[in-house]
Image: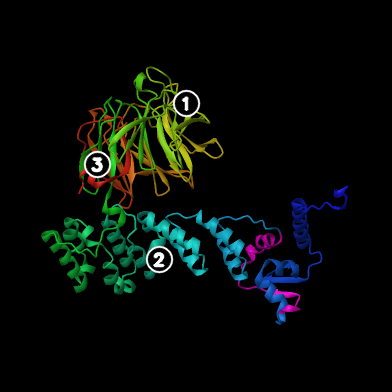
Amino acid sequence: MADQGKKKTQAISNEKYRDVLLTTTNQLRKEGVLCDVRLLVGDQSFLAHRSILAASSPYFRGLFTNDMKEKDLMECRLDQLQASVMEPLLGYLYTGNVTLDEENAESLVAAADYLLIQSLKDIGCEFLEGLLSPSKCFTLRDFAEKYSCDSLKSSATRYIVKHFNDACDTEAFKSVEYRVYIEIIARDDLEVSCEEDVYETLIKWVKHDLETRKEYFDELFSKIRLSSLSRHYLINQVEKEELVSESFYCTKLVVKALNAFILHEYDDRECARNNLKRYLDVITVCGGNLCKEATCYSPAKKKWLPFADMLKARDEHCTAVHDNVLYAFGSTQTENGQSVEQYNAHTNSWIAVANMPQMRCAATAVTCGDHIFIIGGRIPNGGGSTKQVMRYDADINKWFIETSMSVKRAGLCSAACDGLVYAIGGLSDRNEFLRTVERYDPRKKVWSDVTPMQVARYFACAVEMNGKIFVIGGQSSSGAYLSSCEALDPSTEEWASLPNISVSRQAAGVTRLGYRIYLFGGCNNSGSLDSVECYDDRKRSWEAIARMPCKRSWVQCGVLRVAKDLFELN
């Protein structure tokens, strides 16, 4: 009886009603029903409700409630905005929903900044962060600075610092302002493979507009860590540069640096970039011809150094690098056909990890996002080509089966670009040499056809660089070993011929470091090869740069950042 006096209460929030209300109100706007203000932008007009605009934007609230002439006007001119973004902008103010794309994102952020709509500005900036790339990072940084988008500016700056070489190899770099450029190259955390790269961007930037920019050269040159340059480079490149030799200040810095090399007296105030202090980028070369041997090549030092041998002898295997760890998969031997091992650069040792679900050789491995994909290949000891795809999650050491390709392929090559995986060429289960290409979307789990290559290739090499996929060498359907190369532009799906390699080959190892492609070993009619060639995308030419410690085919490569003291690379 005591509970009879209590009244039950319950607060209820009806989200469905709220969504219907917003959608209906927006529909009234579109139909011009009960609208009490007309927004004029350029030569177009847009009807709206003052109350909705005032509730959604502090700008409109002030406009319609303060003692301004616009307070009682039925028309309001907004010439600072673009008419093309008004519909998505009003749609967001009414419903909180907006569709962003590469065409409207910047204009919407600019409009949101002007109208003081912070939530839309934040959404737009987050979208623009996802568009950061070598060709857009500088322009997006400038945009962020103009509209006080602190998070976007920080993200763009971090991107430039991390991808400095690629960012400076774009047209946008040539228009970068002095104050932005000097801020970047002065940073200790600038990530480059060698200090020579920073110096070369300086020369390129100044000479792009020599008359205007020459006055900045001395100050910019002082940001180059001369003690991190090689003595040979200082003498043969820097000292002979006219911009340097014409400046007393710069010449004095060069002489000081050269004396430091001779006397071993270095200025503690000029420390190396953070990533150049203890680490060096090297190219790991492992396996092939049923051997366990692994070595590494340092392009900066131009020398070979030994790595610990692999646990298993491997041939027609494949490798991929994920999170600075190199993984080796499969072999032609049945006992090693499923085995997988990883190389730890901190301890110079190999350890076994989870076996593949199936034996595999003549497959290809590629890292895309946080996963490694093993594509195609064949079963060791007489197995035919397969179209199956396996995915390895290195973080949890587990395997998953992915959607199969449409065509069975062995001896194919692959590359990843913009979150998509490309499977290229190879040999079909009918022993047909393939020029076809397939593209896999890991998110949608779907394969689609891409424009075929110019020629069929078996055991060719593929690598991504600057948003394009380079395919090198291989064996043709006539049995000839190829020296030809071609590149796919994924944005147009068109193939373009490239300069030939000097030695025709198949079953070589390939990798990319900076703006250069390195090609190791392989075989042709003369047998296994030990030659190494390098392609410079800026010069569009190949050159022979070294010899491998021994001749090797079906060798595999990957770039690792290793500690100098562990491998005595100083």
Determine crowd level at label 3: few under 14, some 14-19, many 20+ residues with C-alpha closer than 10 A: some
At a point 70% along the width and 79% down the height, the residue shown is: 66
User: Observer-nearest residue: 567 or 210?
Assistant: 567
The answer to whether residue 92 is magenta is yes
Name the N-terminal-most of marks 3 and 2.
2
Image position, residue 321 (x, y; %): 37, 39
The answer to whether residue 193 is magenta is no
- Specify the quadrant of the image occupied by residue 222: bottom left
* Front disc: 3 or 1: 3
The residue tagged 2 is 175
Residue type, mark 3 in image: Tyr
Instruction: Please tell me whether mark 3 sits on a helix, a strand or a loop.
Output: strand
Q: Say above or below: 395 vs 204.
A: above
Q: Which mark is residue 157?
A: none
- Specify the quadrant of the image occupied by residue 195: bottom left
Q: Which mark is residue 297?
A: 3
Name the N-terminal-most of marks 2 and 1.
2
User: Observer-nearest residue: 541 or 163?
Assistant: 163
Residue type, mark 2 in image: Ser
Image position, residue 343 (x, y; %): 32, 36
Would residue 42 be seen by someone viewing this image from the given angle? Answer: no
Taking the view exactly as shown, the residue that stands out farthest to the front is: 2
The residues colored magenta run 70-94
The residue tagged 1 is 408
